[in-house]
Image (cartoon, rainbow, N blue to C red):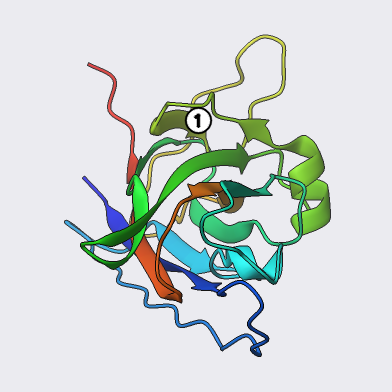
Amino acid sequence: MHSIIQKVHLIILLFLLGTCMAGKAQHVSFGSYSRDNEDIVITKGTPENLNFNDKTQVINPGASQTVTINLNDPQAAVMTIEGTEYLDVTVYVDAPATLDLDPSNTIPVRFRFAYSNLNPADVVSAKMQAVEVPDGFNTATFPILRRINGPPGPPPTPPSSGYTPPRKKAYLFIYGILGPVGNVDAGLYEGTVNVTVEYSKFN
């Protein structure tokens, strides 16, 4: 079994009403762990995290404000998943229900994710081909390279000492809705999304 855990810190900067502050740089921490080897490779893209202040610069407490980052917005976080092209992977997204300043100051957040596996040339074309996972789901199984309709082809050549199976990349996008923002203190609110990817096993 191959598995990699990708940790993405999601940071917002909350502004008090009437306060004018410059946005601070966001910090992203990535952790990659493999249970077997690193045949599956997850790579952060651009942007490498979600920052709701990149969508709405001023977020006001006590106004029940919501901020939405959609799949096609440039603020959606991007990752690539590289693996053996003819194998299926299962992606698990473990996301928090809130972004937190401290235990007394939290903001609700709901995350969505989508994948693109038609061998896209770049992020723009990947988004145009992306399949959105239904709201409320935290897992999805799909082939690294989506298979063409029609009769199945010949079985793939198994890996051996003289042969390395072809590899492809699929894209993964994470986005979501922050809020409504209640009566909370201003500050740096953050949370961590753990993304685990492994080859699928069908028993």
- From the viewer's side, name the closer residue of 33 and 162: 33
Horizontal side, residue 86 vs residue 56: left or right:
left
**Residue 83 position in % (x across, y down):** 47, 52
Q: Residue at x 52, y 55 (%)?
A: 62
Q: Residue at x 42, y 27 (%)?
A: 137
| Residue at disc 1, secondary structure | strand
Percent of width and height locating residue 161: 33, 59
**Label 1 sits on what residue type?**
Phe
Q: Kindly identify which residue carries mark 1.
A: 142
Q: Could one spot residue 196 in this view of the protein? A: no
Viewer-side residue, 142 vs 66: 66
Spot occupied by residue 84 in the image (x, y as percentages of width and height): 47, 47
- Left of 180 or right of it: where is 39? left
* Residue at image coords 70%, 37%: 130
Question: Viewer-proximal residue, 92 or 66?
Answer: 66
Q: Quadrant of residue 52?
A: bottom right
Q: Which quadrant does the N terminus fall into?
A: top left
Given the current orientation, which residue lies at the most extreme left position?
35
Q: Residue furthest top?
A: 151
Q: Residues within 10 Å of mark 1 (few under 14, many from 20)?
A: some
Quarter holding residue 131: top right
